[in-house]
Image: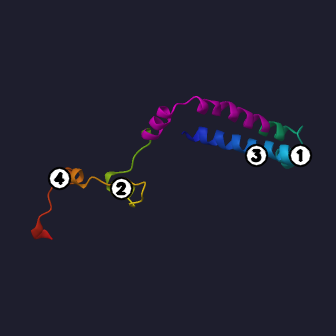
Amino acid sequence: MSGFMRFALALVIIGALNWGLIGFFNFDLVATAFGGQNTTLAKIVYAVVGLSGLATIALLFKTNEEIVTDVEREEEPSDRFDRIRNVNYNTEFGEELDFKKKRKEVKEPIEKDKL
C-alpha cells in the first residue's frame, strides 16, 4: 500500500472515531479542537477526511491477488537475511523446512577437513 493510501486510511479511521464519539457521547472532537463546526479550519479537516474516504473506496474493489502483487513489488532485503526471515519455530502451524532442497542450492559443499 502506498504512503498516500496509508495516510488516507489513517484519516478515515480518525473520522470514524470522531463519528463514534458523536454517536455515543454527542461529542464532536474536531469541532471542539478547532473552535466549532463552522470555523474554516474545522471545515478543512472535515473536507480532507471526506476526500480521504473517497480515496480509500478503491481498497474495497481490490482483489486479494492485486493486494499480494502490491506486496510482492516491495523491495526485498538481500539474500543474507533469508535465514532470518524463514525461521521455523516448530509450532503446530509451522511448516517443516526441506533441507534436502537447501543442500542442493549450496554452491560449495562443506568438506569435513575444514571442520
| Residue denoted by label 4 | 107
The reply to whether discs 3 and 1 touch (Cβ–Cβ < 8 Å) is no
Task: Let me know if residue 70 is in the magenta part.
Answer: yes
- N-term mark: 3 or 4: 3
Q: Position of residue 6 (x, y in %)?
A: 60, 42
| Residue denoted by label 1 | 26
Question: Dot 1 lies on which element?
Answer: loop
- N-term mark: 3 or 1: 3
What's the distance in space between the residues labelled 2 and 4, CA to CA?
18 Å
Residue at 85% across, 38% down: 40
What's the distance in space between the residues labelled 1 and 2, CA to CA?
51 Å
> Image quadrant for the N terminus?
top right
Check disc 2 and give the amino acid type.
Phe
- N-term mark: 1 or 2: 1
Single out the mark in the foreground, 3 or 4.
3
> Image quadrant for the C terminus?
bottom left
In depth, the one of 24 and 110 nearer the eye is 24
In depth, the one of 30 and 26 nearer the eye is 26
| Residue denoted by label 2 | 81
What's the distance in space between the residues labelled 3 and 2, CA to CA?
39 Å
Left or right, 109 with reference to 47: left
Magenta extent: 46-72
Q: Position of residue 63 (x, y in %)?
A: 52, 31
